[in-house]
Image (spheres, rainbow, N blue to C red):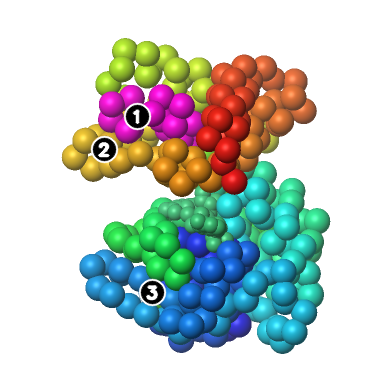
Amino acid sequence: MNIVIAGAGAMGSRFGIMLKQAGENVILVDGWQQHIDEINQNGLKANFNGQDVTEVIPAYNQNDLSDVDFSADLVILFTKAMQLDKMLQSLDNMLGKDTIVLCLLNGIGHEDVIKKYVDYDNILLGNTMWTAGMEGPGKVTLFGNGSIDLQNLGEGKEDMAQNIADVLTNADLNARVSQDILTSIYRKACVNGTMNGLCTILDSNMADFGDTSSANTIIKKIVSEFLAVARVENVFLDEEAVIEQINGCFNRETIGLHHPSMYQDLVINNRLTEIDYINGAIVRKGKEYGIETPYCEFLTLLIHSKEEIVRAK
Ligand code: NAD
């Protein structure tokens, strides 16, 4: 299958490597020229569960695709949320009428952007538990296991979704077709919508924040806003179960001592965050649905202030 990985950072590189290893015809499209040059000159390198691997995968700059003759069967979107619209614009002449587009970004509401460029029937929305880290241009770290849930947006497109899940599973990416992808997306957004912004503002790992006497109250306030917005979209989440999942992040034996990805983006790497597509999306949707979302709004504003203070790019 001809597969374009659109956004070949940490996660795009993982998917690119695993799909290439499974025999798929993969290309990478990205906007970071140094990374692209490194991949094209020396291969895409990974520390893959402790082993060094190098895969030769062609990489192209998204701003220079006019000479690229590649008819994509599948595009897997793995930009950061704020890069998505521009990436889809760049891909325009690679998106044929049968090209399937799978979105695995964190955050809420990406379908509203994708459907400007892609036939609704060809869109798959997903959620992944795989992780990956960027070491530097041309090099990623890939540890652990994961899975993917995905679902077709168009009616009657279940076979298409199953076909793509099979391609991903054949590459050991453990994909399954979900019947309620929006529930998984909202559930993960609740985790990201609390841990990411709060640990970034409080300069804390997850376990230390979880130990504070106000953690539970703050988390409940934020989660209640996510759940109220989700309900308007007929997505019903159990508040206690969501909070229990969030509390799982505080476990010092597993992931509690880690800083969430937003912290790494903003505090460590001075990069802009996805806050507008997590808490910020709840604020936008809340305005549309007539729901007050003061906690998400305040957290979004705080993160934007911090982005300005550290001059994030
Ligand atoms: P990433 O930051 O590694 O890559 C995203 C884009 O940013 C790529 O185009 C990449 O080339 C570019 N980029 C990365 N570092 C850069 C640098 N120093 N300078 C210039 N450009 C740079 O993002 P990711 O972690 O692959 O995440 C992609 C999407 O997947 C996001 O929506 C994220 O929330 C989601 N996600 C990530 C993980 C994870 O473990 N990393 C897990 C699940 C979902």
* Residue 15 visible in the displayed image: no
Question: Which residue appears at 50% of the width and 25% of the height?
Answer: 223
Q: Which residue is mark 2?
A: 257
As drawn, the residue found furthest toward the left would be: 253
Question: Which residue appears at 75% of the width and 84% of the height?
Answer: 67
Is 163 left, or right, of 96 in this rendering? Answer: left
Task: Write down the quadrant of residue 291 in the picture.
Answer: top right
Residues at badges 1 and 2 in contact (C-beta under 8 Å)?
no
Residue 299's mark?
none
Residue 78 in the image, given as x and y percentages of width and height: 56, 60
Comes first in the chain, label 2 or label 3: 3
Name the one closer to the observer, 167 or 40. Answer: 40
Badge 1 density bin: few <14, some 14–19, many ≥20, Cα 10 Å: some
Q: Quick check: is 72 in the magenta stretch?
A: no
Q: Which residues are magenta?
A: 191-209
Q: Nearer the viewer, mark 2 or mark 3?
A: 3
Secondary structure of residue under mark 3: strand
Q: Which residue is mark 3?
A: 45
Badge 2 density bin: few <14, some 14–19, many ≥20, Cα 10 Å: some
Q: Which residue is mark 1?
A: 204
Q: Main secondary structure of the magenta part?
A: helix
Q: Amino acid at mark 2?
A: Leu
Badge 3 density bin: few <14, some 14–19, many ≥20, Cα 10 Å: many
Q: Quadrant of the N terminus?
A: bottom right
Secondary structure of residue under mark 2: loop
Q: Amino acid at mark 1?
A: Ser
Q: Nearer the viewer, mark 1 or mark 2?
A: 1
Name the one closer to the observer, 157 or 286. Answer: 286
Comes first in the chain, label 1 or label 3: 3
